[in-house]
Image (cartoon, grey):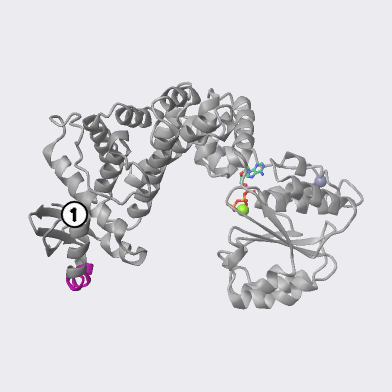
């Protein structure tokens, strides 16, 4: 196997080889064909969508020595084309703005721009990661970018358009590189896998595509990584290597939910968290799967809309367990929990509460109904199996969740720093992140009222605030 990374080996060499980006391909091809070359271009868009590759291709198109004028099909073998590929061209300077971002660098560049090209037709400056330039450097470049000498072309590339001075943006032709579709990535990965004799199935390719957020570099990198396994690669391998939740793991969770098996549910969740998967990751995978289930319910034929890693066949069987409304409510639960997870210090407990809330018999009847606190095992399922501590923690956490639900959004952030650890008669004990101790002390009475409402208690409550020790796994020790 070659030592060059796949994403480097398969860098597109002509505009035609660029995957997707149809408008950019047409516009740049026509610019070259009709010799309408702008003094400055700005390529923007998310990671690994083809900006730097396109900048190099365009430079080759402008300077290829095998034709008399710029061509949309650079030969790739002339001295100019080859030197651009290896970043050794005297006429094409690829400048990493991340490490050459000062005003002196900009001045040096302006000076070089006055020199005539050595071998090609144009002197081209590719300013990669141009958002890293300082304000002064941008300002120094302004004039030059607006009216460069006729033989100079600037190509600025950035993932962060908002950090580029608006005065610069308005002087450039801006091309927006879109994230690539899952289908396009799968197709391209398939071609690369064939060429490299990597044995990988379609579902695994789809899993890679979904994990790479529309960027082809990440996708090729992951393909390269899984190709090192000595077996036929499946979606499960991909998820294992990427540190995601595997299809098998997601299926265990969904099966436990569909059979009301609280014990299994909590056990799977604990195993996942103990194996290093964060509650956030688990929830977001589950959210995707529920979204897929909802799609299967509402549009059974639209397989291409599925984005999670559980296969269509498995989802279809599972979808029979739930009706549309239950799935909808579950999605709402997951979304709510995802929000809370952002602030909380005890993510593992929230995960458990959220999972318990997905059991259909425990789902709120209607999303608009006022929240009341339900005992976790109100149907008696597996109550003997459920560890007492888990039931208790989960129950208290659920009460706290409903307190947070009734709070103003601005207060929810603070409340997420607390953990209800005891509730006996009219006394409640809250463990809070030490930094927020004073804030909680001063809001004790308001919290007491909220707790009274959440528990529908007749008598006023008193709240005791303690600081929590954070344990290594992120859970607050009770
Ligand atoms: N549209 C595309 N068509 C074909 N290959 C692509 C495309 N986009 C990315 N790639 C692959 O990903 C690699 C990286 O692409 P490139 O360097 O052009 O991305 P970029 O948009 O400049 O990313 P970054 O913002 O991270 O610099 C390429 O070598 C190529 O293998
Ligand atoms: Mg780049
Ligand atoms: Zn050439």
Location of residue 159 with respect to 445 vertically, above or below: above
Residue with the most extreme right position:
68
Location of residue 4 with respect to 165 vertically, above or below: above
Q: Is residue 376 left or right of residue 236?
A: left
How far across and down, in percent of the image, does residue 199 sit? 53, 22
Is residue 305 something that shows in the picture? yes
Residue 449 lies in the magenta stretch: no
Location of residue 175 with respect to 283 vertically, above or below: below
Q: Nearer the viewer, residue 22 or 14?
A: 22
Q: Residues within 10 Å of mark 1 (few under 14, many from 20)?
A: few
Residue with the most extreme front position:
458
Majority secondary structure of magenta residues: helix
Q: The magenta stretch spans which residues? A: 435-443
**What is the number of callouts on the image?**
1
Residue drawn at (65%, 49%) of the image: 178
Task: Name the residue carrying label 1.
Answer: 456
Q: Nearer the viewer, residue 62 or 213?
A: 213
Is residue 242 something that shows in the picture? no
Q: Is residue 18 left or right of residue 266?
A: right
Q: Secondary structure at mark 1?
A: loop
Residue 116 lies in quadrant: bottom right
How far across and down, in percent of the image, does residue 89 sit? 73, 55
How far across and down, in percent of the image, does residue 35 sit? 89, 56
Q: Give the quadrant of the N terminus.
A: top right
How far across and down, in percent of the image, does residue 230 sit? 45, 23
Residue drawn at (66%, 72%) of the image: 166
């Amino acid at each position: 196997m070659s030592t060059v990374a796949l994403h480097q080996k398969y860098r597109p060499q002509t505009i035609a080889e660029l995957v997707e980006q149809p408008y950019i391909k047409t516009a740049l091809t026509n610019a070259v064909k009709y010799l309408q070359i702008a003094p400055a271009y700005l390529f923007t868009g998310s990671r690994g969508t083809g900006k730097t590759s396109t900048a190099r291709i365009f430079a080759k198109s402008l300077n290829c020595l095998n034709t008399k004028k710029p061509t949309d099909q650079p030969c790739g073998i002339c001295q100019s084309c080859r030197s651009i590929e290896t970043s050794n061209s005297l006429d094409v300077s690829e400048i990493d703005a991340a490490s050459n971002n000062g005003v002196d660098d900009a001045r040096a560049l302006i000076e070089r721009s006055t020199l005539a090209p050595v071998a090609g037709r144009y002197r081209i400056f590719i300013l990669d990661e141009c958002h890293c330039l300082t304000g002064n450097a941008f300002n120094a470049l302004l004039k030059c970018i607006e009216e460069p000498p006729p033989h100079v072309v600037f190509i600025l590339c950035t993932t962060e358009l908002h950090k580029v001075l608006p005065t610069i943006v308005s002087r450039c032709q801006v091309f927006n590189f879109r994230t690539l579709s899952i289908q396009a990535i799968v197709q391209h990965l398939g071609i690369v896998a064939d060429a490299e004799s990597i044995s990988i199935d379609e579902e695994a390719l789809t899993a890679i595509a979904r994990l790479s957020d529309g960027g082809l570099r990440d996708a090729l990198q992951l393909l390269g990584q899984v190709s090192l396994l000595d077996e036929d690669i499946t979606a499960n391998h991909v998820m294992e290597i990427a540190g995601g939740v595997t299809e098998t793991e997601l299926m265990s969770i969904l099966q436990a939910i569909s059979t009301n098996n609280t014990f299994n549910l909590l056990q799977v969740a604990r195993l996942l968290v103990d194996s290093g998967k964060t509650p956030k990751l688990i929830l977001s995978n589950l959210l995707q799967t529920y979204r897929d289930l909802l799609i299967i319910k509402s549009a059974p034929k639209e397989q291409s809309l599925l984005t999670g890693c559980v296969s269509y066949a498995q989802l279809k069987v599972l979808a029979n367990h739930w009706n549309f409304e239950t799935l909808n409510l579950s999605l709402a639960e997951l979304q709510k929990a995802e929000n809370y997870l952002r602030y909380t210090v005890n993510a593992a407990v929230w995960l458990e509460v959220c999972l318990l809330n997905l059991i259909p018999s425990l789902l709120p009847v209607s999303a608009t109904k006022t929240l009341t606190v339900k005992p976790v095992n109100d149907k008696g399922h597996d109550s003997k199996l459920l560890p007492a501590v888990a039931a208790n923690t989960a129950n208290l956490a659920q009460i706290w969740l409903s307190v947070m639900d009734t709070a103003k959004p601005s207060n929810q952030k603070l409340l997420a720093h607390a953990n209800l650890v005891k509730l006996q008669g009219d006394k409640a004990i809250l463990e809070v992140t030490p930094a927020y101790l004073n804030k909680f002390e001063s809001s004790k009475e308001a919290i007491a009222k909220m707790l009274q409402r959440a528990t529908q208690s007749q008598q006023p409550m008193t709240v005791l605030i303690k600081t929590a020790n954070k344990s290594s796994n992120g859970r607050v020790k009770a």
